[in-house]
Image: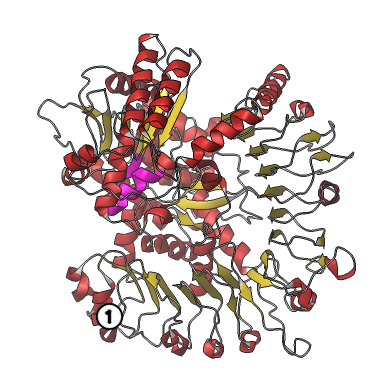
Amino acid sequence: MGHDCGTQRTNQKSFRMDSKRSIPVLNEVLVDLDHEVKTIIHRLTRGSKLLDFVSIVGMAGLGKTTLANRVCNDPLIMSHFHILARCTVSQVYSMHSLLVQLLCSISSRSPDEYLELDENDLALKLYKLLKRNRYLIFLDDVWEIKAWNLLERSLPDDVNGSRILFTSRIQLQFKPDSKAHHLRHLTDEESWKLLQRKVFGKEGFPPTLGKVGPQIANLCRGLPLTVVLVAGILTNTAEDCWEEVAKSLTSNIVLDDEYCMTTLELSYSHLLDDLKAYLLYFGAFKEDEDVPIRRLLWLWISEGFVRKTEEKSLEDVADDYLKDLVDRSLVMVSEQRTMGGAKTCQLHDLVNEFCVKKAKEENFLHVLHGRNDRFILTGPSNPFRVCDQNAGNLMIRELMPEFPNVRSLLLFNKDDLGFWLPKLLRVLDLGELEFGAYFPMEVLLLAHLRYLALRTIAVKFIPAAIANLSRLQTFLVRGNSFDCLLPKTIWNIKTLRHLWTTYRNDGFIFPVENLEVSPGLDHLDTLSLAIDPSSQSLQKILTKLPNIRRLRCKMTESREEATRIGNGILGFDCLSQLESLTLVYFDRYGFKFPLNLKKLTLLATDPLWSEISTIGKLPKLEVLKLLGSSVVGEEWEMTEGEFPKLRVLKLSQLWDFRSWTASSDNFPRLEKLVVRWCRELEEVPSCLGECPTLEMIEVTGCRESVANSVKQIQQEQRDMGNEALKILIEGCVDARSSSEEEEESECGSSETEPISSEEESESSEEEEESESRECPTLEMIEVRGCRESVASSVNQIQQEQIDMGNEVLKILIEDPWSSSEEEEYGVLAKKKKKTSQVPQKQSQSPHKESNVS
């Protein structure tokens, strides 16, 4: 191509999803799949009552996963099956990983809660969850029958119509008579419509492209992924050069199953040289992994890819490059931030495969999968970057002396490293390798290090020798359960940009001695801070950090009583660049906030509702989260003009919050409202029905009156012509009498203590049968940690509901006590005490990790 037909790069201001064309999003529905969806649903819900398989087979890039997710999210499927679980298998997998994925998809719990359990424990837990339930298991990207063989013993067959849905590039014969659903290619017309939508959005295509446009669409051979990739090329190509793109596609005489790779090669050749490095770096992450955006940007910066400009910070420049890759459909957004932009991203597995292969060819990055990769590392041209995903760190220890020129080392496993590290390392991520209470002093000898990430458990201070890392930009500590004291020498590392801990309730403690003469950290952008406000040092420390944009601040235990006057006011208004602020455990304090603040999170911090109204006057605030008893008082009476730019409001576990009064001029730009476990709240203000920008309301664990008020708001929005407002309501019930609450409390205590007599067990069964069996409105029964006889009674209730014509009743039974079942399964059950379900599920755990890990 000539110079005029090269890629056109635009100046991006921020990573906000406001492009005229559609942004590539994970599981995005690209074409009309209604007929395919109906066919699969019919096969899943009809036929034999025996456990059966339904497979979606097709080549890479056809949209198998998108179709399967569309099926799983269909209301008919969600009402037919009591439990829906899913996991991604891929070519490299482990039994432990598959079981954890399935359990997390059922219970909505963090994977961290299952990490210490072995495969037998996990398999038993999954078996008990699924027993007596009609379930659908979705296994995505299966490459061999062995994966099913590993899982088979964990999946009971109660002859109730349970199903296994899987996608694969190859036809796998799980049963002799099983028939695969082969996903068809797009027609030429469908390809052209998709290409128009991805390039031009709703604007329509120029008439001048009426000939070459359909020609290019036809050359995509009916593969949705190829259409999307070509759209990414065309979006950055002048329209008078589209003929050149068509010629490039015509010259690729390859089979269909290689065509996506050839198109990827074409997309890659159209990238600016700088952008190629950013794309290939994704090869360091596992296939189908959700990549945390912040961690990715920090790695890019530490690798030296990002060049600073006068107008923007390094983080903003890196963000622009990521947006460029998203705009070209090479990267998909898998989760979005409340402030706009991407929180996590992912590659299509074919794009990931391309990146790994191309990075290896260009000696840019090498991924170790096993000992067979050894000869590559000891060859004449050693790679500068090594990523160990599955080979085991033992091999790294053996090979390290043989490739001293490695600059970046990214690990994923827990094995002992042995600590012989190349002295020229710039990037070191030690993955899941834990150091307990010991800080690995060996890393402090790596004078060129710019990025250091490690996992500790109980490290309480950082050695003074960290100042040896005079080029360090990012220091990330995972898993530490204590606040960590920094040495005085920390002030000497002038390059520091990110000091972060993944547990939200822990942070770094800055030294306060001689603060007046200590140099400032002018480049620090992101900080997890732990501080004793009564020491009067907060203000002095903040003045040393003038360019902080993201701050999480946690109060440590104070020896002095603070008041709400004088020094009881904590001032963050000196941070003129601050955009995101999280405050944890700051009870008995007031605050001053900078006018530039865009996001504020309060956790276990107890201002009055009148002070929240003061926060409402912040002119740029877009996101407000009030979590875990973070406000004192029953009534929130809003005044005129509050929260002029707020887009997202989240209220969670505000136990005393009862009355909420607002007017039509509050929240003029609100897009999303989340209310969780505010049990005393009576209703959501009806004036939200007049908000023209509202897109989503989520309500969980509140009174039924709150749910009804939200439904009324949705109806008012529809009357205004806004059909787009979605509401999600879970676990909302009528206000109960005190006697009922006491009864429930007693019942709840039986989860932590065994039933003391047969009489209690029998009476509870009788109560379930007499009150629930004939109830026409019953939708859900959950039983946890009870005898098998209780589970049996619930099963009987479900059958009677089905006989009455109620097919929607779902039951969830966890850990029923049954020695015979354990013998049948062949694993000795572990009897563990359980805490109350609701607080455990919604509490702000002191060990909750942020997504940057």
The x, y position of residue 672, in whole percent, is 66, 38
Q: Quadrant of residue 739?
A: top right
* Residue at 65% from the left image edge and 68% from the top image edge: 313
Amino acid on which disc 1 is placed: Arg
Q: Residues within 10 Å of mark 1 (few under 14, many from 20)?
A: some
- Going by the image, does 29 lie left or right of 589? left
Residue 98, magenta (yes or no): yes
Quickly name the residue at label 1.
Answer: 397
In this picture, which residue range is highlighted in magenta? 86-104
Q: Which residue is depicted at the point 30% across and 72% down?
A: 415
Residue 270 vertical placement versus 140 (above, below): below
Residue 770 falls inside the magenta stretch: no
Q: Is residue 114 visible?
A: yes
Along the line of sight, the residue nearer the viewer: 726 or 812: 812
Nearest the eye: 499 or 325: 499
Q: Place residue 357 in its image quadrant.
A: bottom left
Residue 507 place in picture, x, y as percent: 60, 70
Dot 1 falls on a residue whose secondary structure is helix
For residue 315, above or below residue 603 = below
Residue 81: horizontal and vertical position, in percent? Answer: 36, 25
Across and down, in percent, residue 463 comes to 53, 87
Does residue 175 sit above or below 379 in this rendering? above
Which residue appears at 39% of the width and 16% of the height? 807
| Residue at the farthest top position | 804
Apparent side of residue 458 relative to residue 785 in the rendered image (left or right): right
